[in-house]
């Protein structure tokens, strides 16, 4: 087997020096302040070994990676009722697109595009105060990472709340169809805050371990989700986790993975590893450019593609 420790540090030193780094997201003003020079990687294997390099200890805005944890929380609370609200199909459109909602009677294609994630967050917030809804997502992430210090970056949440007109449009549109049942403002406030949760690559890779291990946290032995549910979440990450670049990501990398516009990606090599990468520069589809390149090199060398 390839030398994983050497590979991780080799990937980091090559990508730290890369010149073509993509564009940092600027539609959330607070994210535009982050330097594109960052690169971090954390790989945790099934035996618990952690390999980290670059800025793996520095917290960044997890943004859409939070949609994985929100989905886990909604499924734990509501079971398969979640699938009455959102579908399981790749959208083939941008993460913040509205066009399919009208054509498909307000039902988002999947839980990872913004519309689907807002509908999932609405289910989490159902019958609770916005604060309780957010705390349930944070509590899950803290439990999965074994780290009580994880919190949200309030400046990022405010920055998105002040400029999130597209998400407000998506939420209001879905409210008209009944896909969202609660007050739109409350649902959006939980959604913006969950996206503003800040984590390092190391914390994120730890939080993803249950998805590599059939739904069981390998450290505590706790069943977070059933093996079937873990398999299904991985299936959705593979088919929908990179929006309209999901096919390309499956083609190049071949791992279930979820990206965020903060530049983070959580990737799962089932039975083998939980991986987090971070580099803030994005591709035109809003996925980390160097993060994707790192995962390509890692999956290729380790032969970790699921195909
Ligand atoms: O709702 C938004 O636009 C952001 N809070 C999250 C979008 C996102 O991370 C898309 N991912 N690549």
Image: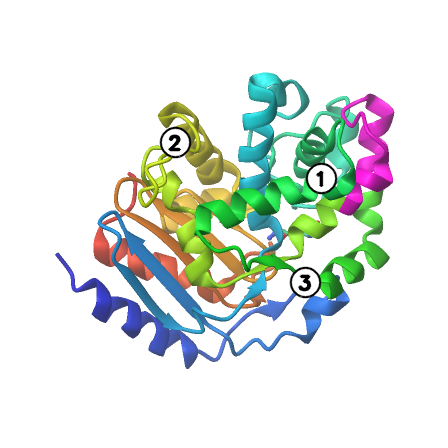
Residue 227 vertical placement versus 37 (above, below): above
Q: Earlier in the sequence, mark 3 or mark 2?
A: 3
Neighbor class of circle 2 (other Cα within 10 Å; few <14, some 14-19, many 20+) is some
Instruction: Name which quarter of the figure residue 31 lies in.
Output: bottom right
Q: Is residue 176 magenta?
A: yes
Label 3, label 1: how far apart the Cα atoms are: 17 Å
Q: Earlier in the sequence, mark 2 or mark 1?
A: 1
Label 2, label 1: how far apart the Cα atoms are: 23 Å
Expressed as whole percent of the image width and height from the top left, the position of residue 34 reads 63, 74
Label 3, label 2: how far apart the Cα atoms are: 29 Å
Relative side of 74 to 175, left or right:
left
Residue 125 vertical placement versus 148 (above, below): above
- The range drawn in magenta is 169-189
Front one among 246 and 208: 208
Q: Earlier in the sequence, mark 3 or mark 1?
A: 1
Expressed as whole percent of the image width and height from the top left, the position of residue 233 reads 46, 33
Query: Which label sits on residue 153?
Result: 3
Residue at 86 percent across and 41 percent down: it is 185
Neighbor class of circle 1 (other Cα within 10 Å; few <14, some 14-19, many 20+) is some
Secondary structure at badge 2 equals: loop
Expressed as whole percent of the image width and height from the top left, the position of residue 176 reads 87, 26
Residue 225 vertical placement versus 143 (above, below): above
Query: Which label sits on residue 132?
Result: 1
Q: Which residue is denoted by mark 2 in the rendering?
A: 223
């Amino acid at each position: 087997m390839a030398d994983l420790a050497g590979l991780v540090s080799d990937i980091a030193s090559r990508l730290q020096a890369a010149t073509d780094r993509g564009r940092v997201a600027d539609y959330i003003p607070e994210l535009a302040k982050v330097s594109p020079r960052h690169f971090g990687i954390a790989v945790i294997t099934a035996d618990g070994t952690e390999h980290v390099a670059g800025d793996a200890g520095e917290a960044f805005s997890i943004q859409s990676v939070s949609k994985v944890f929100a989905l886990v929380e909604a499924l734990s609370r509501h079971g398969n009722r979640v699938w009455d609200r959102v579908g399981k199909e790749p959208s083939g459109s941008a993460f913040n697109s509205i066009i399919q909602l009208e054509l498909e009677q307000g039902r988002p294609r999947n839980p990872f595009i913004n519309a689907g994630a807002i509908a999932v967050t609405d289910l989490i917030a159902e019958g609770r105060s916005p604060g309780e809804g957010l705390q349930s997502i944070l509590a899950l992430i803290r439990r999965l990472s074994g780290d009580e210090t994880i919190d949200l970056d309030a400046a990022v949440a405010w920055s998105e709340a002040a400029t999130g007109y597209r998400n407000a449009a998506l939420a209001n549109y879905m409210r008209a169809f009944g896909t969202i049942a609660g007050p739109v403002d409350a649902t959006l406030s939980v959604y913006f805050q969950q996206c503003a949760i800040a984590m390092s690559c190391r914390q994120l890779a730890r939080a993803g371990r249950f998805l590599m291990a059939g739904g069981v946290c390998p450290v505590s032995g706790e069943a977070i989700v059933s093996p079937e549910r873990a398999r299904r979440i991985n299936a959705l990450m593979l088919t929908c986790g990179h929006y309209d670049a999901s096919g390309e990501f499956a083609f190049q990398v071949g791992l279930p993975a979820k990206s965020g516009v903060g530049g983070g990606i959580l990737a799962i090599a089932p039975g083998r590893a939980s991986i987090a990468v971070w580099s803030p520069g994005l591709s035109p589809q809003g996925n980390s450019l160097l993060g994707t390149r790192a995962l390509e090199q890692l999956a290729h060398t380790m032969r970790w593609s699921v195909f």
